[in-house]
Image (cartoon, grey):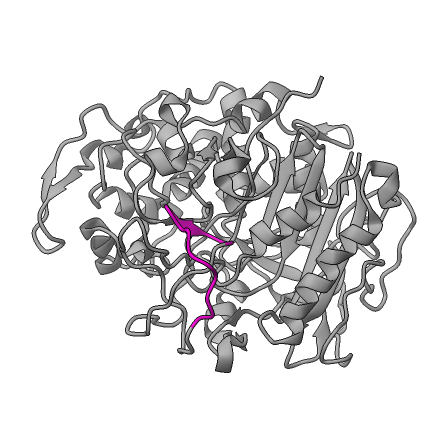
Amino acid sequence: MTRPRRGPSDDAGGRGERSGDPRGHRRRRAGRGGGNPKSDRGSAQRPRPCRTPQLGRARSRSRARHAHDPPGPRGGHGGHGDAGDGLGGQPRADGGRGRRRRHRGGPRRHRPDHRDLPLPPGRHDPGHGLTVADLKVEVEPREVGLDADRLRRIDSHFARYVDDGRLPGWLAVVSRHGRVAHIAHSGHRDVEAGAPITSDTLYRIYSMTKPITSVAAMMLYEEGAFELKDKVKRYLPAFADTRVYKGGGAGSPQLEPQIDGMRIWHLFTHTSGLSYGFHHAHPVDALYRKHGFEWGSPRGLDTAGTIDAVARLPLVFQPGTSFNYSMSTDVLGRLVEVWSGMGFDDFLRTRIFEPLGMDETTFWVDGDDADRLAALYIPFGEGGRAVRWDEGGSAATRRPEFLSGGGGLVSSAGDYHRFMEMLRRRGELDGVRILGPRTVDYMTSNHLPGGVDLEAFGQSTWAETTFDGVGFGLGFSVLMDPAPYRTIGSAGTYGWGGAASTAFSIDPVEDLTLAFYTQLLPSSTYPIRTQLQQLVHQAIID
């Protein structure tokens, strides 16, 4: 019997870099479907036009809030190589840096297409199983208990987002029993250049980096590098002196010592007391902004220096007493370096990306690969239309000083599908085992104290998930009860998402995975994630 495991994908946030100053712009009410505040019960609303995205500020728990990941990738994004000469992902003699031609032309408005994605020039399909950048429908939907006509509702629904200018372009992938049953796409990766969505388009995945970082850390857990109950200060001495906010304003806060101390499991579950500067909900958030953590990290600091700087800021609460979406996963990324003795990027490349064939997943994009990087858009055009935001998007083409475990990666749909398949298969793909099955089960269980949901345990701040009926595991949101979640789905579904409206989820009960890729920041703009989930689940017919 398949044992139900963990929660809905509704998303994640992943900070932006220092590109643009979003302060001083008009607030707008968040939509329902992306990163959502606690008690976000309002309907999605069109954002007001303004120059750059502004993150949520504190509001009462009964009102909808902003739900934005900050602009621009938090660390850079960079290429460790291409997928090979074709969709088969075979390595090239040139180390994966063969030249690609820029895609131009094509209709301004793509109608949805559930067939194979167009291939970039010079690439071919060697005709074997799913590998790097390979996105092909592998099975008739009915063979895996899905209705093809009902699945096409995904196509028509999200095509309207492109037709009226709300999204530049998008790609959705639905897989069941490990076989891709439906691919739909519409629009452009670069509207201004007329470049369509293709199989090897690269996306800033922002906080979809977090599950990868969490997997990396748990690989080292399996090797005995640490215990979840270990105190963080044992490995990062800078956290020995981290104090906790007690009262007062950001100018003169009253602080107290930690009572029990921050532990490793607090970082996985965002119960550490750390925060994000973009929350605008607490005096500590203002201190983050004051010290250079509004959209990214202070200039001139590498990963170790950045995390030491975070340790000097006070905690919002005593560790383990509440949930607050934060830089906790960035601290985990630094701990991966400490435990492994390797650079964070080197560990990810050699221990996860290369074994899984994820040659497109990097911290920054350079050279010819930049042509494949989707442009970044914000919904501040007339009537909420998506407009290009180069100032925020350009950070993905620079090597970062700080490698953000919370939001720094760029990836392709094919690459992330392989990561998802590894999780769906409980830690193994194509004979390569990344994690033990019971470790994956453990990570994708609800770890909030008392088994409560985020509504009962979380702060009144934004996170890349709704709170009602949703718990949190070791790096993933976990759907506990679809009824208060207000969207059809299975208890045990887990996943996350990113600032630019990307998202994924894995439903162990239905043996179903779904993913959505676009580049519209912030993820709260439209209820894309919940809409995708309901459109996919209504197509299940067995």
Examine the rendering and report whether any part of residue 91 can be seen: no
Q: Is residue 308 magenta?
A: no
Left or right of 501: which side holds 373? right
Image point 75% across, 64% down: which residue? 198
Q: Of all residues shown, which one is farthest toward the right?
A: 127
Left or right of 128: which side holds 369? left
The C terminus is located in which quarter?
top right
Kindly indicate the quadrant of the structure image that contains residue 98.
bottom right
Left or right of 96: which side holds 279? left
> Residue 435: x, y in percent?
61, 26
The N terminus is located in which quarter?
top right
Examine the rendering and report whether any part of residue 50 can be seen: yes
Q: What segment is highlighted magenta in the picture?
A: 33-47
> Residue 291: x, y in percent?
23, 57
Image point 77% across, 51% down: which residue? 151
Image point 37% across, 40% down: which residue? 328
Does 113 appear above or below 431? below
Give whichever of 254, 403 is nearer the camera.
254
Does 463 appear above or below 508? below
Give whichever of 52, 408 is nearer the camera.
52
> Residue 327: x, y in percent?
36, 45
Give whichever of 422, 85 is nearer the camera.
422
